[in-house]
């Protein structure tokens, strides 16, 4: 309770509050910009946060994350171009509502359901994260190794063309994480005598390169015209009949979003798509779906914002990212010298509760801004790409150079940008690579520590029940698509 | 600003992707033989085992990818036209330009040049936006965050 009050007191600091407001505005702004996602922005902003100090930095990044998911819905509804991938489900019904002249109502419902979903998930975060952290106190290196493997296996389900491509990207991330000096043996690996590489490859230039520069190079190859905006007066606060109609969708979306978000690697986009499907399944007005259903806006919006709080649960309690964006936030914390995990709840509780409080505040801020300034934010999509993307590149160069004042980081960023571009072209998602990069050190360290504990005997894992369960879940998750396909094929053959 | 014509054939081709990935993994695996030897007497895994394990996993996954049928080509994956190639060239030239004009000077030139190639033909607007963006970057990074940006040969330290 004391820590919670301490967290609230931190929010009273005008500087922290300003960072949350700034993060919220920036989050809505970039969320509404098609092409620039919340994760890209957080990667771009990471270098700036180094000068801020840990608490304002994490509050700023958390606010961007919360608000970007909502911002994506504005252009999804008015332009049919989801500003953020997590808003793609919202576009299905939201744009249809806009075409029917109900854009204001769709925007209003989006803001309200997003805020409810976001606040519900932060409340769950406040209670679930400490409980998970307490449980994790019993974890040793074998359990953490199994948990990190589980997190990596979940990468199979995020973005990209296929599970195999996602796993390749995650493994490449693990390989990149081995560059530099091995801490247990002192041997330099893949450094090729280059001094900048002996400390390892920094998160910041890789993140900026993969997300921002990769996207910019891709956008340069397909330079489209600007979006056409649907006329909207302003967002309208939904009345009681509309809220009554959507309450079930909002709760379904909030529950699904929080749960999906809490699973390692799965984030807001998956939550929104599942939220949309489940909303339709449980709706009493199924016939309205596909023609502009207000429940079809409320469900996925509640889900994608609930996933934000959910994904922070494993990130803060275990140090395992709950999504691609939280992997970047995790990298930001590591850059600040903070290693999330169970010990954080005893060592720096004020920081944690400040994060919770800032996320609650961000949800309230974007609700107000969403209701009164949605039309203004929608105009963001009209910014010509000829101004936007070159600025992103210049910002990327400065962002990569800034933290260490090193040209080596700029070169790393350019190479990462090329890799990011090739990834997009070949149907790979950069998100699993980031997961692999962030978890790489943990996977290797815990494996080495486990083997030392077991006296180099791998069968020692058999004596650790929690690790065994996690291994079994990982194996089941990876093999299930293959097994189910074989079963379907067998059933078809039997019926033929 | 018309989008380029045909979807590129080289994208979404699993076998080419798999071959490139396997090449990277094989090169990394070979690279582990050039690591310095681990000091004797240290317990547990050495420096080479983990990277080699990852390389083997990547090779296995690359093989799986090569055996997979590629999905339908992404219609958004258009072949890069001359403009795209010029923008990419500008990105590459940014670093040498930085050595001469400094980071902010190179940034201004980059914004004007790539903005023009991107299709913006209103010169006054382009110069104004580039100037304003450079000014904002200078204010945020140099004045607020007290970052020392390279001045280049022409503009200083």
Image (tube, grey):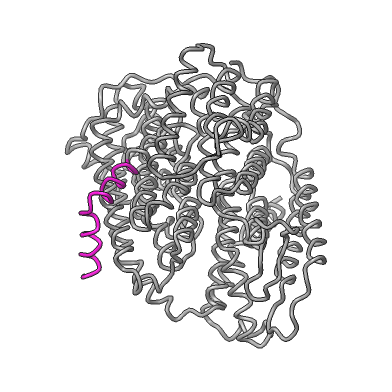
Q: Is residue A344 left or right of residue A438?
A: left
Q: Which residue is at a point 66% across and 57% down the rendered structure image?
A: A176
Q: Which secondary structure is most common in the magenta stretch?
A: helix
Q: Position of residue B39 (x, y in %)?
A: 74, 80
Q: Which residue is at a point 39% across and 42% down the rendered structure image?
A: A69
- Image quadrant of residue A107? top left
- Name the residue furthest left: A240
Q: Is residue A387 left or right of residue A200?
A: left
Q: Position of residue B139 (x, y in %)?
A: 40, 35
Q: Which residue is at a point 62% across and 41% down the rendered structure image?
A: A417
Q: Which residue is at a point 24% across and 45% down the rendered structure image?
A: A364
Q: Position of residue A401 (x, y in %)?
A: 55, 45
Whether A195 is drawn above or below B16: the answer is below
- Image quadrant of residue A142? bottom right
Q: Nearer the viewer, residue A88 or A18?
A: A18
The N terminus of chain B is located in which quarter?
top right
Q: Is residue A218 left or right of residue A384?
A: right
Q: Nearer the viewer, residue A465 or A228?
A: A228
Q: Which residues are magenta?
A: A1-24
Membership of A21 in magenta stretch? yes
- Image quadrant of residue A161? top right
The C terminus of chain B is located in which quarter?
top right
Whether A274 is drawn above or below B85: the answer is below
Question: In this view of the protein, can residue A94 be seen by the observer?
Answer: yes
Q: Position of residue A425 (x, y in %)?
A: 66, 37
Question: In this view of the protein, can residue A484 be seen by the observer?
Answer: no
């Amino acid at each position: 309770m004391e820590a919670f009050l301490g967290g609230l007191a931190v929010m009273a600091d005008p500087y922290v509050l300003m960072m949350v407001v700034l993060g919220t505005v920036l989050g809505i702004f970039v969320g509404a910009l098609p092409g620039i996602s919340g994760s890209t922005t957080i990667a771009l902003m990471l270098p700036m946060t180094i000068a801020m100090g840990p608490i304002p930095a994490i509050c700023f990044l958390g606010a961007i994350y919360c608000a970007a998911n909502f911002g994506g819905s504005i252009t999804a509804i008015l332009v049919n171009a989801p500003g953020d991938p997590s808003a793609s489900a919202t576009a299905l019904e939201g744009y249809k509502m806009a075409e029917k002249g109900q854009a204001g109502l769709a925007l209003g419902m989006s803001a309200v359901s997003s805020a409810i979903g976001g606040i519900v998930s932060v409340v769950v975060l406040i209670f679930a994260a400490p409980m998970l952290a307490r449980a994790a106190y019993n974890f040793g290196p074998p359990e953490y190794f199994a948990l990190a493997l589980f997190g990596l296996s979940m990468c199979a389900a995020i973005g990209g063309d296929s599970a195999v491509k996602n796993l390749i990207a995650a493994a490449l991330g693990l390989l990149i994480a081995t560059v530099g000096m091995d801490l247990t043996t002192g041997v330099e690996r893949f450094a090729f005598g280059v001094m900048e590489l002996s400390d390892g490859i920094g998160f910041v230039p890789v993140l900026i390169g993969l997300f921002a520069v990769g996207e910019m190079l891709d956008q340069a190859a397909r330079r489209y015209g600007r979006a056409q905006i649907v006329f909207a007066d302003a967002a309208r606060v939904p009345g009681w009949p509309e809220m009554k109609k959507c309450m079930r969708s909002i709760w379904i979306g909030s529950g699904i979003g929080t749960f999906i978000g809490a699973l390692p690697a799965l984030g807001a986009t998956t939550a929104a798509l599942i939220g949309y499907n489940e909303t339709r399944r449980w709706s009493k007005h199924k016939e309205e779906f596909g023609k502009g259903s207000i429940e079809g806006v409320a469900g996925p919006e509640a889900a994608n914002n609930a996933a934000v709080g959910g994904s922070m649960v494993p990130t803060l309690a275990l140090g395992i990212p709950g999504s691609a964006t939280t992997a970047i936030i995790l990298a930001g914390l590591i850059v600040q010298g903070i290693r999330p995990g169970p010990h954080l709840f005893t060592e720096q509780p004020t920081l944690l509760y400040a994060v919770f409080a800032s996320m609650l505040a961000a949800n309230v801020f974007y609700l107000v801004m969403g209701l009164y300034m949605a039309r203004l934010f929608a105009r963001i999509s009209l910014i010509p790409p000829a101004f936007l993307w070159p600025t992103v590149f210049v910002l990327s160069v400065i962002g990569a150079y800034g933290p260490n004042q090193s040209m080596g980081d700029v070169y790393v960023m350019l190479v990462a940008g090329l890799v990011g571009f090739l990834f997009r072209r070949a149907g790979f998602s950069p998100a699993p690579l980031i997961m692999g990069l962030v978890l790489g050190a943990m996977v290797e360290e815990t494996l080495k520590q486990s083997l030392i504990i077991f006296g180099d005997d791998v069968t020692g894992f058999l004596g650790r029940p929690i690790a065994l369960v996690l291994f079994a879940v990982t194996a089941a998750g990876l093999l299930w698509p293959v097994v189910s396909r074989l079963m379907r094929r067998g059933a078809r053959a039997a019926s033929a | 600003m018309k989008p380029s014509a045909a979807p590129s054939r080289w994208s979404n081709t699993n076998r080419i992707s798999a071959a490139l990935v396997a090449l990277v993994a094989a090169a990394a695996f070979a690279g582990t033989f050039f690591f310095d030897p681990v000091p004797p007497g240290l317990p547990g895994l050495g420096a080479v085992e983990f990277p080699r394990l990852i390389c083997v996993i990547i090779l296995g996954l690359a093989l799986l990818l090569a055996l997979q049928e590629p999905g339908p080509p992404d219609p958004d994956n258009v072949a890069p036209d001359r403009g795209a190639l010029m923008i990419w060239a500008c990105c590459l030239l940014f670093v040498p330009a930085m050595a001469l004009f400094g980071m902010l000077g190179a940034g201004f030139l980059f914004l004007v040049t790539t903005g023009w190639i991107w299709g913006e033909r209103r010169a006054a607007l382009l110069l104004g936006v580039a100037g304003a963006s450079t000014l904002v970057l200078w204010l945020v990074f140099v004045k607020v965050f007290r970052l020392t940006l390279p001045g280049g040969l022409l503009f200083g330290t």
